[in-house]
Image (cartoon, rainbow, N blue to C red):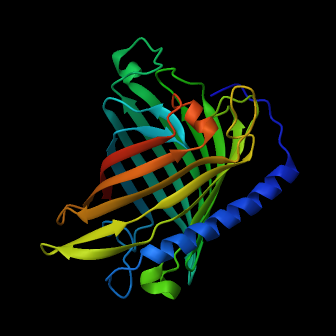
């Protein structure tokens, strides 16, 4: 988290965007070889509570606990209790046939018992490592969702300087065409507009490509949704910099499994997951030289 010096290389970004597309294709091919199971003919989306279709407003509340918190491969905390509450308000602005336009406003926090890097003098402030606010628009055309989100990352404990970022995302629900082979691919490009996530002295641009194949099964008359997310994070321009300012294309790769189950008619969905994170050299430098991390998570989600 450093003071920005806004400068980027367009030709470098174009070459690296091509690399991102290649990575996404590799992920899709790899996942297709192992994702097939004895699944229903049509895979279900991750379990969510039903939201009335006639309501233009919906609210999602979340509460998570994790064994480690990494942001785009950068180690923020890997010990002690880590609790991460969130809330997202969605407003349906326009809907017609296959076209849907939504506005979203969200907040997300991470509270750390270790109080690493905390400079705040209050007890609550020392725990409150991060508090984020985001807002944006989502345009859905059939199975394709395009979204733009502006995010502000702040630290009530003064553990890092405030960052700002513009995210551009594309998500595809390919279940209609691939059935039980559906991969649900996604791509996010993040453009730093104020502050740096790494140790460099320039504003950076990164990309995340991912897929999340899965299936559902019934356990004790309860439907359980299993997902197998795979993802890769790369630098398009000056994102995974070290202290000398050298940039590295590869940031991290992650693979995991998540199980989600509705808790009766409460409107709550519980989830448990485990993932393995493999870090590039520059990201590993910020993890005391450790280039791999196993992360466990527990979560609850309510939809209104």
Q: Residue, x 38% and y 14% (percent of image)?
A: 122
Residue 154 appears left or right of 226 = right
Residue 229 appears left or right of 192 = left
Q: Quadrant of residue 89?
A: bottom left
Q: Is residue 119 above or below residue 16?
A: above
Residue at the farthest left position: 220
Image quadrant where one finds the C terminus = bottom left
Return the x and y of residue 231 as percentages of the image width and height. Answer: 53, 58
Q: Residue, x 33% and y 54% (percent of image)?
A: 273
Return the x and y of residue 134 as percentages of the image width and height. Answer: 55, 45
Residue at the farthest top position: 121
Q: Is residue 168 above or below residue 112?
A: below
Image quadrant where one finds the N terminus = top right
Q: Residue, x 52% and y 55% (percent of image)?
A: 104
Q: Residue, x 46% and y 67% (percent of image)?
A: 212
Q: Quadrant of residue 46?
A: bottom left
Number of callouts: 0
Q: Is residue 174 above or below residue 262?
A: below
Residue 293 appears left or right of 251 = left
Return the x and y of residue 174 as percentages of the image width and height. Answer: 52, 79
Q: Foreground: 47 or 67?
A: 67
Q: Is residue 297 visible?
A: yes
Q: Foreground: 240 or 84?
A: 240
Q: Is residue 287 above or below residue 107?
A: above
Return the x and y of residue 226 as percentages of the image width and height. Answer: 33, 67
Q: Is residue 184 visible?
A: no
């Amino acid at each position: 988290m450093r003071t920005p010096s806004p400068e980027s290389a367009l030709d470098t970004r174009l070459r690296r965007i091509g690399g991102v597309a290649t990575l996404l294709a590799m992920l899709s091919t790899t996942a297709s070889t192992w994702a097939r199971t004895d699944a229903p003919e049509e895979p279900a989306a991750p379990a969510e509570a039903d939201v009335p279709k006639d309501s233009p407003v919906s609210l999602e509340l979340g509460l998570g606990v994790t064994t480690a918190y990494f942001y785009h491969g950068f180690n923020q905390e890997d010990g002690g209790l880590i609790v991460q509450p969130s809330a997202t308000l969605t407003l349906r602005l326009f809907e017609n046939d296959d076209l849907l336009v939504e506005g979203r406003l969200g907040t997300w926090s991470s509270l750390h018992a270790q109080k690493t890097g905390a400079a705040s003098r209050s007890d609550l402030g020392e725990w409150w490592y991060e508090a984020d606010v985001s807002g944006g628009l989502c345009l859905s055309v059939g199975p394709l969702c395009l979204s733009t989100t502006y995010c502000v990352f702040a630290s009530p404990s003064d553990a890092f300087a405030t960052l700002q970022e513009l995210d551009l995302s594309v998500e595809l629900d390919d279940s209609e065409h691939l059935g039980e082979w559906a991969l649900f691919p996604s791509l996010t490009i993040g453009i730093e507009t104020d502050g740096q996530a790494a140790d460099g002295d320039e504003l950076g641009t990164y990309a995340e490509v991912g897929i999340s194949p899965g299936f559902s099964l019934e356990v004790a008359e309860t439907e359980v949704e299993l997902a197998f997310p795979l993802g890769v994070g790369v630098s398009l321009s000056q994102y995974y910099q070290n202290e000398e300012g050298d940039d590295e294309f590869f940031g991290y790769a992650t693979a995991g499994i998540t199980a989600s189950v509705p808790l009766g008619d409460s409107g709550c969905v519980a989830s448990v997951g485990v993932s393995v994170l493999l870090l590039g050299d520059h990201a590993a430098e910020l993890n005391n030289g450790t280039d791999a991390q196993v992360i466990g998570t527990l979560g609850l989600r309510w939809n209104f």
